[in-house]
Amino acid sequence: MREPLQCLSKVEARLEILKRISLSVENGDSSAVKELTKKAIEQNISPEDILNNSLIKGMNAVGEKFKENEIFIPEVLIATRAMKAGMDIIRPYLAEQSYKSKGKIIMGTVKGDLHDIGKKIVLVMLEKEGYEIIDLGIDVAKERFIKLIKKENPQIVGMSALLTTTMWYMREVIGAIEKEGLRKKVKIIIGGAPITPAYAKEIRADGYARDAQSAVSLVNHLLRT
């Protein structure tokens, strides 16, 4: 039985509530995530601390379980909703600390692929860094990428794939962007479990990121050059 938070020292209480949020994300308990995140804010735990040490930590654990076939798509989706419940609480606080948008990014999981756990974590990290984010979701066709590039004029276009059977579609999207004369207007980044730097180079992407933190570093680098 867990000790009540009020009986713990300030440091212990911080660690305990972050741990509880993380576990609630893993378990897909949206109500608990929402309640605990509100309590964390009330206890003056920073939104960055909540994001990095509970919400993202919980989703990373979900991602590992998924890769090991311990859980499947339905459980991942439930966990994603739980993480979103926490994000909805802390997002206004993160926005207060943000400066003028560093740039606009659109990102989607390519056609035929329904996996977006990694993409969601990347987008959360980029949003925290001050970027304007447009999430195209999953199973995104090249026509939708083109439509949104024309409509939103982003600096970065990101594509994600978790399957070797869908990663090939990234090449089609890049080809369509080139055909529409939009290639020089955007930087293209790709990521996902089967993606490699060699594949990024082969399909003429501007960069590859293996995880959320390297994606942030990559975007920062591309928009400085």
Image (cartoon, helix red, strand yellow):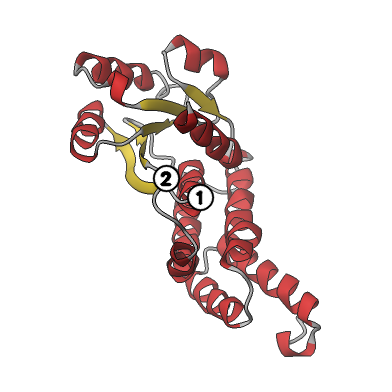
* Kind of residue at badge 2: Lys
In the image as oriented, which residue stretches furthest toward the bottom? 7
Q: Is residue 17 above or below residue 120?
A: below
Q: Where is residue 161? Give x, y as percent.
A: 44, 30
In terms of secondary structure, where does tag 2 sit?
loop
The numbered dot on residue 102 is 2
The answer to which image quadrant residue 114 occupies is: top left
* Kind of residue at badge 1: Glu
Question: Residue at the location (36% across, 16% down)?
Answer: 171
Q: Is residue 195 above or below residue 76?
A: above
In the image as oriented, which residue stretches furthest toward the top? 202
Q: What residue is shown with label 1?
A: 129
Question: Residue at the location (29% across, 25% down)?
Answer: 185
The numbered dot on residue 159 is none
71 or 136, which is in the foreground? 136
Q: Where is residue 94? Give x, y as percent.
A: 49, 63
Q: Residues within 10 Å of mark 2 (few under 14, many from 20)?
A: some
93 or 102, which is in the foreground? 102
Q: Is residue 68 above or below residue 163?
A: below
The answer to which image quadrant residue 48 occupies is: bottom right
Question: Residue at the location (48% across, 69% down)?
Answer: 93
Circles 2 and 1: CB atoms closer than 8 Å? yes
Distance between the alpha carbons at the discs numbered 2 and 1: 8 Å
